[in-house]
Amino acid sequence: MGISEKIEEIKKKPEHVRMMYVWGCVIVSMAVIMTIWGFSIKANSSASRMKDSGSSDDLKSIVEQFGGGSSDIQPSSIGTPAKEEGGETGVGPEGFAETGSGLPGTGE
């Protein structure tokens, strides 16, 4: 007996019997969906726990990489008042030097 023959057989039955088939299929389908969903939640929660435990190790390696580099950093002259020959600063209205662009490497 094929599936199309089974469907034709169910079509000939009374409505209350067909509704029992419908609800039975709904229950079985939802059980399958809920089972798959439960496994995916379990897998995601265990993966996030492993990710959280590894994050402290990642942070340590980042600190180790960049920890020694702070001595190489030099203070920038951008945004600091420029001293003129008279010892006074040529500060504009925004508090930045008026002479040149103030950008490093431009020679101004």
Image (spheres, rainbow, N blue to C red):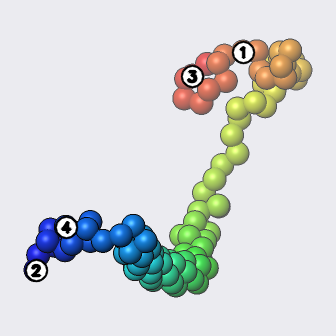
In this rendering, the answer to whether 93 lies above or below 10 is above
Disc 2 and disc 1: Cα gap in Å? 94 Å
Is residue 71 or residue 66 the one in the foreground?
Answer: 66
Name the residue that disc number 4 marks.
8
Which of the 4 quarters of the picture holds residue 36? bottom left
Disc 3 and disc 1: Cα gap in Å? 11 Å
Residue sitting at x 58%, y 66%: 66
Is disc 3 surrounded by few (<14), some (14 to 19) or many (20+) residues within 10 Å?
A: few
| Residue furthest out toward the left | 1
- The label nearer to you, 4 versus 1, is 4
- The label nearer to you, 3 versus 2, is 2
Which of the 4 quarters of the picture holds residue 100? top right
In the shown orientation, is residue 38 left or right of residue 12? right
Helix, strand or loop status at disc 2: loop
As shown in the figure, which amino acid type bears the numbered disc 2?
A: Met
Which mark sits nearer the N-terminus, 2 or 1?
Answer: 2
Helix, strand or loop status at disc 3: loop
Name the residue that disc number 2 marks.
1
Name the residue that disc number 3 marks.
107
Name the residue that disc number 1 marks.
99
